[in-house]
Image: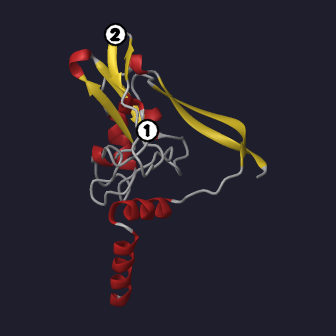
Amino acid sequence: MAKIKKTIKTIKIDADKCNGCRTCEVVCSGFHSEPKYSSINPATSRIRVITHRLKDIWLPVFAGEYTPAECMGRDKYIIDGKEYDECTFCRATCPSRDMFKDPDSGLPLKCDMCEGNESGPLCVEWCLNDVLIYEEREEEVEEEVEVNEMEAGLEALIDKYGYEKLGTAFSRLSQKG
């Protein structure tokens, strides 16, 4: 495969500054509602603030790639005297948790950096404490085939229900049209 220059968009998180206001969740869910800003449902947000109020933990986590298998690691980490499990930092949508799945369809969600918004990700723009910092950098990477949202959604449905059941459902739907 050929090497190409690609703009990598990332959001750095300074968790020490987060106070758990969840503004990031609200603006993300509004931006991704259909039509835009027609409803607010943090369950549809591509960012979640993981909280443990008694230990004063507020940790924003973004939705990443879909993975059909859950990980084997269940390690615990202690950072600044606070205990975290491995899933806390994981961005993947996987079978072991529903954190980044659409509540209506069950399809995986992924942060798209508010694609189409001229000023970049709204969670960064609206973050009151500068917890989220948007960065772009050029990187030389291997050229890869991009999986679009529909393909990722179909893969998730196949993993959940099996290829045969999904094929049967498509067959039934095509006969209706």
Whether residue 47 is visible to the viewer of this picture, yes or no, is: yes
Q: Residue at x 76, y 52 (%)?
A: 1
Q: Residue at x 37, y 35 (%)?
A: 24
Q: How is the image coloured?
A: secondary structure
- Of all residues shown, which one is farthest toward the left? 54
Badge 1 crowding class, 10 Å Cα cut-off, few under 14, some 14 to 19, many 20 or more, is some
The residue tagged 1 is 91
**Disc 2 vs disc 1: Cβ atoms closer than 8 Å?**
no
Residue type at tag 2: Gly
The residue tagged 2 is 81
Q: Residue at x 31, y 60 (%)?
A: 105
Whether residue 21 is visible to the viewer of this picture, yes or no, is: no
Return the x and y of residue 91 as percentages of the image width and height.
Answer: 43, 38
Sequence-first disc among 2 and 1: 2
Badge 2 crowding class, 10 Å Cα cut-off, few under 14, some 14 to 19, many 20 or more, is few
Front-lying residue, 54 or 122: 54
Return the x and y of residue 38 as percentages of the image width and height.
Answer: 31, 55
Compared to residue 105, the image places residue 81 above or below, namely: above
Return the x and y of residue 72 as percentages of the image width and height.
Answer: 40, 37
Return the x and y of residue 123 as percentages of the image width and height.
Answer: 43, 36
Query: In the structure shown, which secondary structural element does the residue marked by tag 1 occupy?
Result: loop
Q: Quadrant of the C terminus?
A: bottom left
- Of all residues shown, which one is farthest toward the top? 81
Residue type at tag 1: Arg
**Left or right of residue 9: residue 78:** left
**Count of residue discs:** 2
Q: Which numbered marker is on residue 14?
A: none
Compared to residue 39, the image places residue 26 above or below, namely: above
